[in-house]
Image: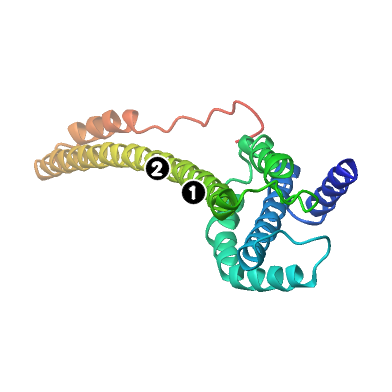
Amino acid sequence: KTFVSIVSQFAGVFIFSTVSSYTFGQSLFIITVVKNYSENVRLFSYQIYFLSTGRLPEGSVSAISCIMAAVSLALFPLICWFYKKLMRPALDYSRSLVIWKLIWVIPISNTIIYTMNIAPDTTNYSYFPKEEFLVLPALWCMMTFMTYGIFLRTVIAVSRNAELQEKLHLTEVQITAQQKYMEDLQIRIQETRRYRHDIRHHFLVLGNLAKSKDLDGLQKYLEKISAFSVLRPTEIFCENT
């Protein structure tokens, strides 16, 4: 029976990971957490029945089914909040984290511990002393989902921190590029100022030569400044300009 349960669970995980966008490790975590939730509902239902009657139910009792339905309905808002606020963000933020390849061990271990040591044994009614059964279900459920909550919050924090680090890195790259652009722009501005100063100087010299009607000096100066302004042909290094 245990082997069949394990095989069916892994088959369900495989089908879920195939039809969804989650990895096999994430799917195994989701399915096992859902299984833990159903086990906790069953455990609470048995506790309520025990508190009401003073004994565990014998075999299949319709009252247990009604209690389980009522407990599931009462806990539905809590499990919705758990999924929307913790599980779904953790899965979406950390889809590529390697941790999902191993973290399924936690819910699997909880399932094994529950099955071997905590699950109500309806064939042995002295298995749970009264005092132990009053405390154990609530303590087990609280510790189980507190563990999941702490882990999922940690995953969300790590993922958001990695996202912020990536944004910070991109911002630093943009700032560095902007600084380099401003440095190049300052160099171009200084070169432009120098060119304007040189051109103004050339115009003054040419104007003075023209006023003094020194045509020979004007011709020589024009030849002199023309020698510096000759454009060199563009060198072609390869076909790709």
Q: Position of residue 145 (x, y in %)?
A: 56, 51
Q: Residue drawn at (32%, 33%), measured in percent from left and top?
A: 226
Please name the residue that numbered disc 1 is placed on: 153
Say which of 203 and 14 sits in front.
14
Which of marks 2 and 1 precedes in the sequence? Answer: 1
Q: Which mark is residue 33?
A: none
**Amino acid type for the residue under numbered disc 1:** Arg
**Amino acid type for the residue under numbered disc 2:** Leu
Please name the residue that numbered disc 2 is placed on: 168
Left or right position of 10 against 127? right
Left or right position of 180 against 233? left
Q: Secondary structure at mark 2?
A: helix
113 in relation to 52, above or below: above
Say which of 191 and 123 sits in front.
123
Q: Position of residue 53 (x, y in %)?
A: 66, 66
Q: Position of residue 96 (x, y in %)?
A: 63, 41
Say which of 168 and 40 sits in front.
40
Q: Position of residue 110 (x, y in %)?
A: 66, 42
15 in relation to 170, above or below: below
Q: Secondary structure at mark 1?
A: helix
The local crowd at label 2, few if under 14, some if 14 to 19, many if 20 or more residues have their Cα within 10 Å, is few
Say which of 137 and 89 sits in front.
137
Q: Residue drawn at (64%, 34%), measured in percent from left and top?
A: 240
Q: Are marks 1 and 2 in contact (CB under 8 Å)?
A: no
Q: Quadrant location of the N terminus?
A: top right
The local crowd at label 1, few if under 14, some if 14 to 19, many if 20 or more residues have their Cα within 10 Å, is some
The image quarter containing residue 88 is bottom right
194 in relation to 14, above or below: above
Colour pattern of the rendering: rainbow
Tag in front: 1 or 2? 1
* Separation of residues labelled 1 and 2 (CA atoms): 22 Å
The image quarter containing residue 227 is top left
